[in-house]
Amino acid sequence: MTAAPRFRVASQPGRWRSLKGGEFNPEDVAKAPIVGWGDEREDPFALETYGADEIFAPAAPVDWLLEDLDLCPGPPAMLGGYGFSGKTMLAQALAVSVAAGRQAWGLFKVRRGSVLHLDYEQGAIVTRRRYRQLCKGLGVEAGDLAGLAVATHPPFRLDEPSAEKWIMRNGEGRALVVVDSFRAAAPSADENSSDVRRSLDLLSRCAERQGFATVVVHHAKKPSKDSRAGASVSLRGSGAIFDACSSVLMLTRGRAAVRVDHVKARTSGMLQPPFHLCIAGSIDDADDGGAIAIRPRDAVASADGGKMSAATAAIADALARHGALSRSELQGQVRMSTGTISHAISALRERERIVNVGSQRSPKWLLADPERPTCGT
């Protein structure tokens, strides 16, 4: 006896359905497109695998959204920081840059594309106002943001069974999906348990299938002064949150600028040196006529994103944190070649950003005036 043909539908790919009487039910097909055919002997629990042919086949190039910060389809990137460190502001600015095809934060080249912002926390009034202010600061018009879509308080959470269907449906055709914030998006998950990464893994699966990059905003906890465990412990919750991400950026707000530490880059393996961003304009300004501009701090980071600007940024940051250092001590801090450090020191001396507080034979370099304001308003 021949078994009736079977098929699977998109909404339940693990469940086989029989084709009764050899005819389709038009209503069933309309509700759930067919994604596969089989017969009664097929095992619904068989894994979809790949082997040596696929492993050794020429690899497709990574579809980078922002290569310098390791943003691409796959596991999410995370913006972490304490309250009011600028996490959501930088996430919204990145969304504008991708939708309008502008440099991210005045530093990094992005691939232009459609953006979905899932706003679980901020609310429509503040989110819309911030977008208007950021666009004004960037000189972006409404017509440049045709690819930006915002959903405030979406009707699903990442820890709900239906979340994957929502993300797959609404992530289709997107280049970037922003989730703000992780805690609000997965409120029932215990963030101190390793199970919390299930929601991030869900985003990873959807991102790989649909081809979008994901940025998740998450809060941080303040590490102890003696802690040397690294930035992973400053993310609030289980270490599994850090493990589930492809890229992690930690934000610390200072008096003059926001410091950004790139502490994980799984796909490329290349970390950016620490850089500083100025947020010019009032974050809490309720006046829609105001503008907010985000740009790199002068003499520390440069819009060209080149090797020398990265070296000078790293050296200036090391001097700001440790005080006077010799060239060999700097090399131990920034881990760059002697030649690169020497050229960067020369560049900083020409800008009068550092001074020699040692001897001519054994120079030690110190920031000329680390408290000098570096951002205009």
Image (spheres, helix red, strand yellow):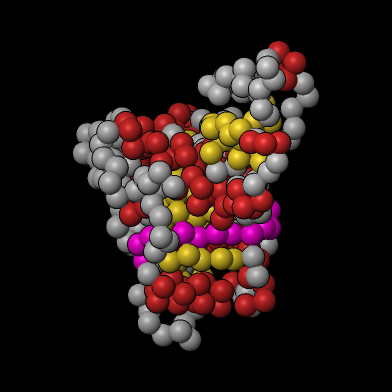
Instruction: Name the residue at 46% across, 59% down.
Output: 118
Question: Most extreme residue toward the top, as rendered?
Answer: 52
> How many marks are shown on the rendered structure?
0
Up-down relation of residue 55 to residue 365 (above or below) = above
Residue 101 on image: x %, y %: 68, 62
Magenta stretch, main secondary structure, is: loop
Instruction: Name the residue at 35% across, 75% down.
Output: 284
Q: Quadrant of residue 194?
A: top left
Residue 376 on image: x %, y %: 47, 72
Whether residue 198 sits left or right of residue 301 in the image: it is left
Residue 282 visible from this viewpoint: no
- Of the 4 image quadrants, the one containing the C terminus is bottom left
Residue 69 on image: x %, y %: 56, 44
Comparing 280 with 87, the one in front is: 87
Q: Quadrant of residue 7?
A: top right
Magenta residues span: 108-122
Residue 264 visible from this viewpoint: yes
